[in-house]
């Protein structure tokens, strides 16, 4: 009789441990999938790059390409950290930092106008609400409720090189 009781207790404990691990795995998966949309998350699933070829060293965001901006993968190390770049961008654009629904950073090479493959931190403030139009100034209401701001911080000096509202 005691052996049977030990087996039953062992199966019971195995079931509890298995259920705990299953719940833990589901929570982890949920965090991976849904946690990416957290406002303070510095990691982000880039919707604009979802269709991009990840094997290519060329990273293009269609809205930026339309503005004459191209991006490439940066392989060298940055002088300033991602956190420092985010802090600088937040200081430069406090309203965007406060109101954005999502913020992300990516280390890339920027080419635009007189900048050629300059290593930068691209800070993206996503879904910043647009204030309603003043009907007395502009009677046509805006069709958009939000926009994005791209801030490019020089990865060596920490200076803002470019900012683009889209």
Image (tube, helix red, strand yellow):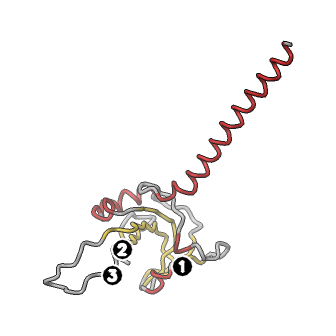
Image mark for residue 143: 3
Q: Earlier in the sequence, mark 1 or mark 2?
A: 1
Element type at marker 2?
Answer: strand
Q: Quadrant of residue 113?
A: bottom left
Q: Secondary structure at mark 3?
A: loop
**Pair 3/1: label in front:** 3
Question: Residue 127, labelled with which disc?
Answer: none
Q: Can you give x and y, in whole percent of width and height, for residue 68 in the image? A: 44, 86
Q: Is residue 27 above or below residue 49?
A: above
What distance separates the C-alpha of mark 3 from that of mark 2?
Answer: 11 Å
Q: Quadrant of the N terminus?
A: top right
Q: Which mark is residue 147?
A: 2
- Distance from Cα at disc 1 to Cα at disc 2: 19 Å
Height in image: 25 above or below 43? above
Q: Is residue 120 left or right of residue 26?
A: left
Q: Report the quarter where the C terminus lies.
A: bottom left
Instruction: Kindly state the secondary structure of the residue where label 1 is placed.
Output: loop
* Residue 144, position as x, y percentages in the image: 34, 78
User: Label 1: how many residues lie within 10 Å, few (<14), some (14-19) or many (20+)?
Assistant: some
The crowding category of the residue bearing disc 3, from other C-alpha atoms within 10 Å (few below 14, some 14 to 19, many at least 20), is few
Q: How many marks?
A: 3
The reply to whether callout 1 and callout 2 are in contact (CB within 8 Å) is: no
- Mark-to-mark CA distance, 3 and 1: 26 Å
Direction top: furthest residue? 2
Q: Residues within 10 Å of mark 2 (few under 14, many from 20)?
A: some
* Residue assigned mark 1: 60
Query: Furthest residue to the front?
Result: 1
| Residue drawn at (74%, 27%) of the image | 12
């Amino acid at each position: 009789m005691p052996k049977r009781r030990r087996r039953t207790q062992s199966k019971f404990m195995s079931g509890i441990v298995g259920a705990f691990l299953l719940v833990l795995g589901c929570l982890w998966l949920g965090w991976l999938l849904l946690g990416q949309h957290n406002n303070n998350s510095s990691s982000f699933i880039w919707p604009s790059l979802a269709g991009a070829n990840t094997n290519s060293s060329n990273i293009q965001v269609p809205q930026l390409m339309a503005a004459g901006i191209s991006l490439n993968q940066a392989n060298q190390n940055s002088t300033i950290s991602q956190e420092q770049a985010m802090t600088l961008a937040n200081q430069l654009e406090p309203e965007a930092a406060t109101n954005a629904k999502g913020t992300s950073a990516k280390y890339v090479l920027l080419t635009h106008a007189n900048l050629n493959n300059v290593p930068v931190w691209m800070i993206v403030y996503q879904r910043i609400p647009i204030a309603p139009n003043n009907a007395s100034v502009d009677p046509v209401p805006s069709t958009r409720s939000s926009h994005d701001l791209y801030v490019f911080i020089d990865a060596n000096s920490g200076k803002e090189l470019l900012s683009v509202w889209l």
